[in-house]
């Protein structure tokens, strides 16, 4: 049936409400229909507000419209300040070519509601039951509008490109956007903005791009009408079933897409909070700014331990050589590195320093080793990379150490000036390079002064070792012999004589008498009383096994055992002339004392022929007196 006059329509409404009859659709084609304040229009059918020619259908609702069917608006749908529209049927659709503005919109009935056109709510969107699927259209809550009685069972489903929009959110006040991306997926958003009054649009979509199992598998899209005008806190809700396989609620962070890159809003995970019964979990981030001219996307991502992209590789070095292990990793926040070593079945942290090996970079991505000992052959190294979310161990890399070839130089280390020596390297290597640039196993050197020689040995693994030796050169030197009876070197038989080898200070002085060794020591003095006439004194002075020699001939005068003092032939007439002499007879009577020699007289008288005793004292002037005793016989020349 079609109605065109106001009175006919008003009569029909009363008939509709009280007759008990049921119609499939109420159609207004160009009429003005008014539902007065306080009046309830209970239409158990579809409502079509349409146009007829130049006449525009108008429904002016100042009262309360209750319908169980669909509403289609191709004309004007006007809502008074105290009006309401209640959708209390099963599945219901809001259709039409012209948008709706409701004062109060009540969602009720046994089924969900679908938007096929955008709507505005001026006062209150009340959920008594079920959900509103907005498809590609918006629900706009005007500045004074609120949402009441929403829950995880009653909310706005942003199943397309449409958003739940709130104009002029009160500053510093939580506003709940009860949204979800599907009928069984409630994902509420609480927004608390500061700055300026502004409009925000919210929707939730399924999935995260690029795919990431460390996230809640939902993307929350929020648009501020004036980018950067507000700084807000955002609280996002989700359920455990929404979480990726690697998501950890205790490590939750909120991420925002900036310039096509996901960026963490906070650098330290605050962790999620239980939010039952609304959702299993919720998380709040503060200090958020909306920067996009289109819309800002947000996700919930747990801070994952670092991901290692470049693993340390096995290292082959020579003993005492150097090398590096390196690792590359990415992760949230500041990454820390700790290198570890395992030589005996357990891992231990490495510290910088040491002597063999010397470590540096123990807490960096590159570990440097130098002076590596052979004892570390076969040891494993790894790096523990950590961030705020945990730690990741790198693969283990093995250190292979080739033992350095042996290198020992043999040869004389002390030579005399002008001599040469052969230096030979004892080694397991097969290539040699001497400091003289020779490449043979042995070299002959004849330095003119003390000099150091070195050799570098290389083996089949190109490992090297070095050795050095100092060849000390003893400069030419000389020695000379003198005696305390120089220059004649004459003395009495049995008299002590001191032989001096000059200069002093050589390592050793070896004295020989006529080829027979008599003394070898560091002393350059020889005191001797057993020399015979014609003996040859020889000294060999030594310094570092180098020698110098000199010889000295002596004249030894024997002490006569008889003399002929009375024949006056001036031959053997005086006994022991020139020495300190005492003569006494057999009775002990002193017959002579002096140094001029005894002439065989006593008190001017010739003594009798016979045997007499003497005492000769020598070397008193040298501080080492020597006494010689014996007998002398006074004889006649004729005897």
Image: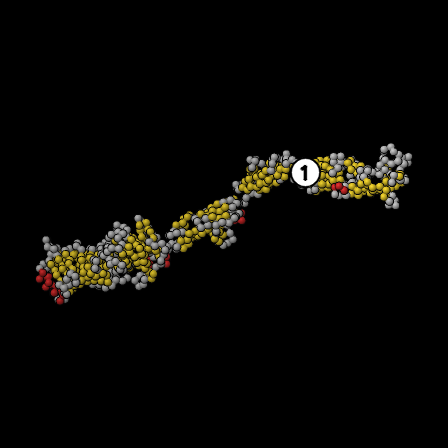
Total numbered circles? 1
Q: Nearer the viewer, residue 627 or 608?
A: 608
**At numbered mark 1, what does the secondary structure look like: helix, strand or loop?**
loop
Q: Residue furthest top?
A: 569
Q: Nearer the viewer, residue 483 or 230?
A: 483
The answer to whether one can see residue 427 in this image is no
**Viewer-nearest residue: 158 or 390:** 390
Picture residue at 74% right of the left edge, 36% below the top = 486
Determine which quarter of the picture holds residue 424: top right
Picture layout, residue 146 above or below residue 575: below
What colouring style does the render use?
secondary structure
Label 1, residues with CA under 10 Å away: few <14, some 14-19, many ≥20: few
Image quarter hosting the C terminus: top right
* Residue 303 x/y as whole percent: 37, 55
State the residue position of label 1: 503
**Residue 236 as seen in the image, left or right of residue 568:** left
Tell me if residue 186 comes above or below residue 444 in the rendering: below
Where is residue 9? Give x, y as percent.
10, 61
The residue that appears at 48% across and 53% down in the rendered structure is 348
Quarter of the N terminus within the rendering: bottom left
Residue 479 appears in the figure: yes
Name the quadrant containing residue 566: top right
At which x and y percent is residue 270? Answer: 35, 58
In this picture, residue 201 sits left or right of residue 502:
left
> Residue 441 location, x and y as percent?
59, 37
Comparing 135 with 383, the one in front is 383
Is residue 629 left or right of 52 when viewed as pictured? right
Q: Dividing the picture into quarters, in which one does residue 570 lie? A: top right
């Amino acid at each position: 049936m079609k109605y065109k006059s106001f009175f006919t329509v008003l009569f029909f409404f009363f008939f509709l409400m009280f007759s008990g009859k049921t119609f499939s659709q109420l159609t207004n084609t160009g009429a003005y229909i008014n539902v007065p304040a306080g009046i309830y229009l209970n239409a158990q059918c579809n409502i079509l507000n349409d146009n007829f020619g130049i006449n525009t259908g108008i429904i002016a609702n100042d009262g309360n419209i209750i319908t169980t069917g669909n509403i289609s608006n191709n004309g004007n749908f006007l809502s008074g300040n105290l009006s309401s529209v209640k959708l209390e049927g099963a599945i219901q659709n809001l259709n039409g070519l012209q948008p709706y503005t409701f004062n109060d919109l009540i969602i009720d009935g046994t089924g969900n509601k679908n938007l096929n056109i955008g709507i505005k709510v001026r006062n209150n969107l009340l959920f008594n039951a079920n959900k509103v699927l907005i498809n590609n259209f918006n629900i706009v809550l005007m500045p004074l509008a609120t949402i009441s009685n929403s829950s995880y069972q009653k909310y706005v489903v942003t199943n397309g490109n449409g958003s739940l929009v709130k104009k002029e959110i009160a500053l510093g006040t939580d506003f709940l956007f009860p949204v979800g991306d599907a009928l069984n997926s409630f994902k509420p958003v609480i927004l608390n903005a500061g700055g300026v009054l502004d409009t925000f649009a919210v929707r939730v979509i399924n999935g995260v791009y690029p795919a990431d199992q460390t996230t809640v598998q939902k993307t929350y899209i929020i648009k501020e009408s004036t980018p950067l005008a507000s700084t807000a806190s955002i609280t996002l809700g989700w359920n455990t079933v929404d979480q990726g396989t690697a998501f950890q609620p205790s490590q939750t962070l909120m991420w925002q897409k900036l310039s096509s890159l996901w960026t963490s809003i906070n650098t330290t995970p605050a962790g999620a909070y239980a939010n039952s019964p609304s959702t299993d979990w919720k998380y709040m981030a503060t200090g958020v700014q909306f920067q996009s001219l289109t819309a800002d996307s947000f996700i919930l991502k747990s801070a994952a331990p670092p991901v290692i992209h470049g693993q340390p590789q096995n290292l082959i070095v020579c003993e005492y050589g150097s090398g590096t292990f390196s690792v590359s990793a990415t992760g949230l926040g500041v990454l820390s590195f700790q290198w570890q070593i395992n030589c005996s079945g357990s891992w231990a942290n490495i510290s910088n320093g040491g002597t063999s090996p010397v470590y540096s970079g123990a807490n960096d991505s590159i570990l440097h080793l130098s002076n590596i000992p052979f004892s570390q052959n076969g040891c494993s190294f790894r790096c523990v990379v950590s961030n705020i979310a945990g730690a990741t161990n790198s693969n283990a890399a093995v250190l292979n150490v080739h033992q350095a070839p042996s290198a020992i130089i043999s040869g004389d280390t002390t030579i005399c000036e002008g001599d040469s020596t052969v230096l030979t390297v004892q080694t397991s290597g097969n290539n040699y390079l001497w400091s003289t640039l020779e490449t043979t196993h042995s070299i002959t050197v004849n330095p003119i002064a003390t000099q150091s020689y070195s050799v570098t040995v290389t083996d089949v693994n190109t490992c090297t070792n070095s050795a050095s030796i100092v060849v000390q050169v003893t400069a030419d030197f000389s020695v000379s012999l003198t005696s305390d009876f120089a220059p004649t070197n004459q003395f009495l038989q049995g008299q002590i004589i001191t032989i001096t080898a000059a200069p002093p200070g050589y390592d050793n002085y070896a004295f020989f008498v006529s080829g027979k060794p008599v003394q070898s020591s560091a002393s350059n003095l020889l005191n001797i009383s057993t020399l015979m006439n014609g003996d040859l004194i020889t000294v060999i002075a030594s310094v570092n096994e180098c020698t110098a020699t000199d010889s000295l001939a002596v004249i030894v005068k024997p002490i006569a055992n008889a003399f002929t003092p009375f024949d006056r032939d001036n031959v053997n007439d005086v006994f022991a002339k020139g020495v300190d002499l005492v003569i006494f007879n057999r009775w002990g009577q002193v017959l002579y004392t002096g140094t001029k020699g005894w002439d065989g007289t006593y008190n001017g008288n010739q003594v009798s022929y016979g045997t007499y005793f003497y005492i000769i004292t020598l070397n008193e002037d040298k501080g080492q007196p020597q006494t010689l005793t014996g007998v002398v016989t006074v004889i006649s020349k004729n005897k």
